[in-house]
Image (cartoon, rainbow, N blue to C red):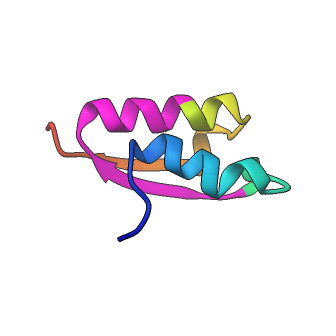
C-alpha cells in the first residue's frame, strides 16, 4: 500500500502543493525519459531553477 499514480502528480499533490517554497529545494530523481520530462515540467511550472534539478535518465 502507499501512494500510486504518475510520480510527478503524486509529488505535486502530496508534497509540493503545500510546501512554502518548492523553488528552494534541490531535487534529484532517476527514471525513464517520459517520467523525467514530466517531473522537469512540473518543477519548472513551480519556478524551480534549473540548477536545483539533477536527474539520471534510464533511457541512455
* Extreme residue toward the right, this view: 20
Q: Residue at x 53, y 28 (%)?
A: 41
Residue at point 68%, 58% (across, down)? 25
Residue extent of the magenta highlight? 25-41
Look at the picture and state if 37 lies above or below 2. Answer: above
Residue positioned 57% across, 34% down in the render: 42
The image shows a total of numbered marks equal to 0
Q: Which residue occupies the foreground of this view, 43 or 6?
A: 6
Camera-side residue: 3 or 15?
Answer: 3
Q: Does the magenta stretch include residue 38?
A: yes
Whether 36 is among the magenta residues is yes
Locate residue 53, reporting x and y percent. Answer: 53, 47
In the rendered structure, the answer to whether residue 56 lies left or right of residue 24 reads: left
49 or 41, nearer to the observer: 41
- Indicate the quadrant containing the C terminus: top left, top right, bottom left or bottom right: top left
Residue 49: x, y in percent? 67, 39
Q: Name the residue: 30% across, 30% down.
A: 34
Residue lying farthest left? Answer: 60
Q: Where is residue 16 in the image (x, y as percent from the top left)?
A: 68, 52
Is residue 19 left or right of 4 when viewed as pictured? right
Up the image or down, 46 lies above or below 11; here it is above
Q: Where is residue 27 in the image (x, y as percent from the top left)?
A: 54, 55
Amino acid at each position: 500500500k502507499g501512494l500510486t499514480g504518475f510520480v510527478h502528480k503524486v509529488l505535486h499533490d502530496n508534497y509540493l502543493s503545500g510546501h512554502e517554497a518548492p523553488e528552494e529545494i534541490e531535487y534529484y530523481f532517476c527514471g525513464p525519459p517520459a517520467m523525467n520530462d514530466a517531473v522537469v515540467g512540473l518543477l519548472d511550472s513551480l519556478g524551480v531553477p534549473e540548477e536545483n534539478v539533477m536527474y539520471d535518465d534510464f533511457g541512455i
